[in-house]
Amino acid sequence: KAGVTQTPRYLIKTRGQQVTLSCSPISGHRSVSWYQQTPGQGLQFLFEYFSETQRNKGNFPGRFSGRQFSNSRSEMNVSTLELGDSALYLCASSFLQGRTGELFFGEGSRLTVL
Amino acid sequence: EDKVVQSPLSLVVHEGDTVTLNCSYEVTNFRSLLWYKQEKKAPTFLFMLTSSGIEKKSGRLSSILDKKELFSILNITATQTGDSAVYLCAVGYGGSQGNLIFGKGTKLSVKP
């Protein structure tokens, strides 16, 4: 069974540009969450999607947005990039049956903003 | 403000040592506490705890939750160099499946 797949794995952008990151969850998983990981702040929740609907959103500015498609694949977008957006962006999926709480993480997309 | 605090932030031990990692939390509508291991990129799931006093075990790793004192510990016995990683504690709350509050992690280095 394939794991969570994130693309691209690495990317470099300049300030003011925008970026789109993609996440394919484990087959059968319908919930996708996004996290930002930085050395100073650790893992911080961005948003969660289930059945193409955003269920929760973390405390990030409106420049951060996302969506989920009917096949559960998800994308997140960051507009008007700032230096502080440099981070590892992790996607996680879960199978919503009961309330197990276990998330399966992808290997992340490493974004560097110059 | 909800928070999860891990200690120590880093730890260096030698193979064969036993280590205890700590996680305390203050989270409204607590649902579960989870431990993850992050070696390079993707955190991998270790344990989920929802009830106090019930130890979860997997090989040399074990964990327990105290919901009265709001903390959990992760024990690793007979450590090996392959245990070197960042160990993350996270708390799930409310009805959300995917929204976890993470601690900043404990970086464990196991020397041969």
Image: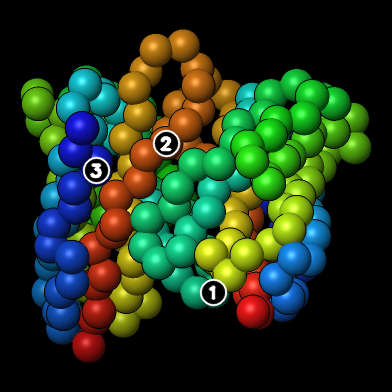
Instruction: Name the kind of residue labelled 2 in the image.
Output: Leu
Q: Quadrant of the N terminus of chain A?
A: top left
In this rendering, the label closer to the viewer, 3 or 1 = 3
Q: Measure the C-alpha gap from mark 1 to mark 2.
A: 22 Å
Q: Quadrant of the C terminus of chain A?
A: bottom left
Find disc 1 in the rendering and name its residue. A40
- Point 72% across, 53% down: residue: B76
Q: Quadrant of residue B110?
A: bottom right
The answer to whether dots 3 and 1 both sit on one chain is yes
Q: Residues within 10 Å of mark 3 (few under 14, many from 20)?
A: many
Instruction: Point out the tag, 3 or 1, that comes first from the N-terminus.
Output: 3
- Point 45% across, 27% down: residue: B97
Task: Work out whether B66 lies above or below A111.
Answer: above
Q: Tag 2, which chain?
A: A
Residue B109 appears at what percent x and percent y?
Answer: 63, 74
Task: Work out whether A112 lies above or below A61.
Answer: below
Say what secondary structure mark 2 lies in.
loop
Residue B10 appears at what percent x and percent y?
Answer: 69, 74
Instruction: Point out the tag, 1 or 2, that comes first from the N-terminus.
Output: 1
Find disc 2 in the rendering and name its residue. A103
Residue A29 appears at what percent x and percent y?
Answer: 26, 25
Find disc 3 in the rendering and name its residue. A4
Q: Tag 3, which chain?
A: A
Say what secondary structure mark 3 lies in.
loop
Q: Measure the C-alpha gap from mark 3 to mark 2.
A: 10 Å
Residue B77 appears at what percent x and percent y?
Answer: 75, 54
Q: Residues within 10 Å of mark 1 (few under 14, many from 20)?
A: few
